[in-house]
Image: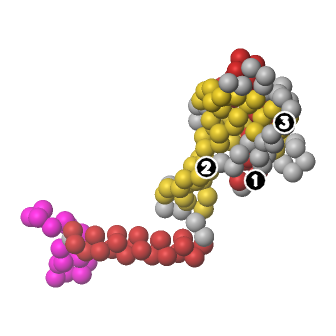
Amino acid sequence: MLEQDLASIMSFLTIHSGNPAPYYKNVPEQFCVPAVYFPRPEIGSSGDTFGTYALDFSLFVKFFHKTKEEAYELGYAAMSALLERRNRVPLIDETGKPTGKYIHVRDPTLRAVDESAVQLEIDWTARKPFLIESDKCAVRSIETAYSAAVRFCTVSYSNPAFAGQEPKGSK
């Protein structure tokens, strides 16, 4: 669930960067530093397996401080915490307690974006099952395509016991 993934990542990064003031919507003009800003993630999609699709998330977290060096310290602390844990973020429940499950993120990237801000890019993929109705349609269409391929590649024999047992061109 996206909300659980995001809440887990936001909590992890905030805690491991020294608890800067978190901002979730827009950063106001007069905001306190140190601060961390969590925008909405960018989302891409792709097929995954016959039963699932993938959502690819990119979260561009910004750390602010009085200087670029101090902002780097915040972002670097969060990035190091991710890397030390093999890029695994503990999933948390609604109360903030760990569930025992993890989100695996790809290697993070830290870069300067302003004189007193750095950006930590966090990317991860969530796999979701297709709807049950879609599953049935997908299975039927795969079975239909497979049956058509089998019919195309096999020969018919006059003896029904051997029908479809030998590929075309094998004789």
Could you tell which of marks 2 and 1 lies nearer the N-terminus? 1
Mark 1, Cα crowd under 10 Å, few <14 / some 14-19 / many 20+, is few
Q: Amino acid at mark 2?
A: Glu
Please state the extent of the stretch shown in magenta in the rendering. Answer: 155-171
Q: Secondary structure at mark 3?
A: loop
Image quadrant where residue 158 sits: bottom left
Residue 137 location, x and y as percent?
A: 49, 76
Q: Residue furthest top?
A: 69
The residues tagged by marks 3 and 2 sit, at their Cα atoms, a distance apart of: 24 Å
CB under 8 Å between discs 3 and 2: no
Q: Secondary structure at mark 2?
A: strand
What residue is at 18 percent from the left and 78 percent from the top? 156
Q: From the viewer's perspective, is 103 left or right of 54? A: right
Residue labelled with disc 3: 31
The residues tagged by marks 2 and 1 sit, at their Cα atoms, a distance apart of: 14 Å
How many numbered circles are shown?
A: 3
What residue is at 70 percent from the left and 34 percent from the top? 62
Q: Amino acid at mark 3?
A: Phe
What residue is at 84 percent from the left and 36 percent from the top? 31
Residue 20 location, x and y as percent?
A: 84, 30
Instruction: Residue 93: say if magenta.
Output: no
Residue 69 location, x and y as percent?
A: 71, 17
Q: Nearer the viewer, mark 3 or mark 2?
A: 3
Residue labelled with disc 2: 42
Q: Residue furthest left?
A: 171
Q: From the viewer's perspective, is 98 left or right of 79? A: right
Q: Amino acid at mark 1?
A: Glu
Q: From the viewer's perspective, is 94 left or right of 72? A: right
Residue labelled with disc 1: 3
